[in-house]
Amino acid sequence: MNKKIFSYFIGSAAAVALSAAIVNPVFAADAQPHKPKIALVMKSLANEFFLTMENGAKDYQKKNADKFDLVSNGIKNETDTSSQIQIVEQMIVSKADAIIIAPSDSKALVPVVKKAVDAGILVINIDNQFDAAVLKDKGLNVPFVGPNNRKGAKDIGDYLAKHLKAGDEVGIIEGIPTSTNSQQRTLGFQDAMSAGGMKVVSVQSGQWEMNNANAIAAAMLSEYPNIKALLADNDNMALGAVSAIRAAGKRGQVQVVGYDNIEAIKPMLQDGRVLATADQFASQQAVFGIDTALDALKAGKKQNELSGSVETPVKLIVKQ
């Protein structure tokens, strides 16, 4: 090789190496830290409660856009568990850093949650608590961030009991029977009715849906003509109960209580069609979960290092 050409190559290589040594530290200094991708997986967005939850999470992300990215998804109705499983699968593939989930079923979602955890994704449970026995069987520690549903329902039931008398017949319209929050709210209602001396004549599932609850309420009113109150595990079903009472010509004769304090229930609280509900602060529920995940990610915690639960507020709401 010509000596001049050889010298040129050596000089050029040295220049490139020197340039890299100078430039690389600058790029390293300018490199942005990883911004976590948080996935919010909800139940039916046709339910005003979950739409409010999603909007609250989106507003929070806009105010903290430099801290995390948010992907939110919901299902078409409260029983569409297979679609919710698919959403979690998609979040695993898209490599979310954390999943905040309000499961449609307390048991059926656990296997896919284990898959997410095994993939290194943090999972935080909100709204409807996973079944403790199933989690234990899968060796999972998934913290629950949410209210004490049994206590919230008992507060509602205690208030209702003041408007009834011992021996009065009441019916309970529960959500999906395999959902922990439905189980806990039904237990809370039963606690209050037992303490007040009321007689629970029927407990039936309205599947969290207004139309289903309407049919259940109509059947209860027909089968138990002396029924004095219908206790619904959520406000969507309370709306269905109110409609059934109107159709039966029993407005003012049968009390209704719900749970969630959605906007649609507020006029009914004021005119007496609904006696009471509970506010579990839908717009903040997902935010509580997001903050729990962000704190864990910042601290570098693994799933098995997360705390067991974070209790969030729930408040009795009556006519003002």
Image: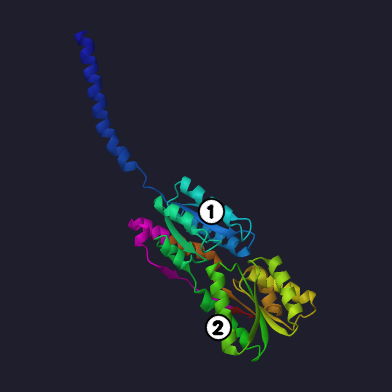
Q: Is residue 112 magenta?
A: no
Quarter of the rendering containing residue 318: bottom right
Query: What type is the residue that disc 2 sits on?
Result: Asp
Residue marked by disc 2: 191
User: Which kind of residue does numbered mark 1 sit on?
Assistant: Ile
Q: Quadrant of the N terminus?
A: top left
In the image, residue 256 sits, relative to residue 176, either above or below, namely: below
Per the rendered image, the range of residues in magenta is 292-316
Is residue 223 visible from the viewing direction of this image? yes
Q: Residue at x 75, y 73 (%)?
A: 244
Residue 81 drawn at (x, y percent): 58, 57
Distance in Å between CA atoms under marks 1 and 2: 34 Å
Is 72 left or right of 28, judged from the image as shown?
A: right
Query: Furthest-front residue in view?
Result: 137
- Residue drawn 37% across and 63% down? 306
Q: Give percent across and percent down for residue 190.
A: 58, 81
* Rendering coords of residue 233 (x, y %): 61, 73
SS category of the residue bearing label 2: helix
Task: Mark 2: give few (<14), some (14-19) or many (20+) Cα within 10 Å.
Answer: some
Residue situated furthest top in the rendering: 2
Quarter placement of the C terminus: bottom right
Is 299 magenta? The answer is yes
Q: State the mark number for residue 85.
A: 1
Kind of element beneath mark 1: helix
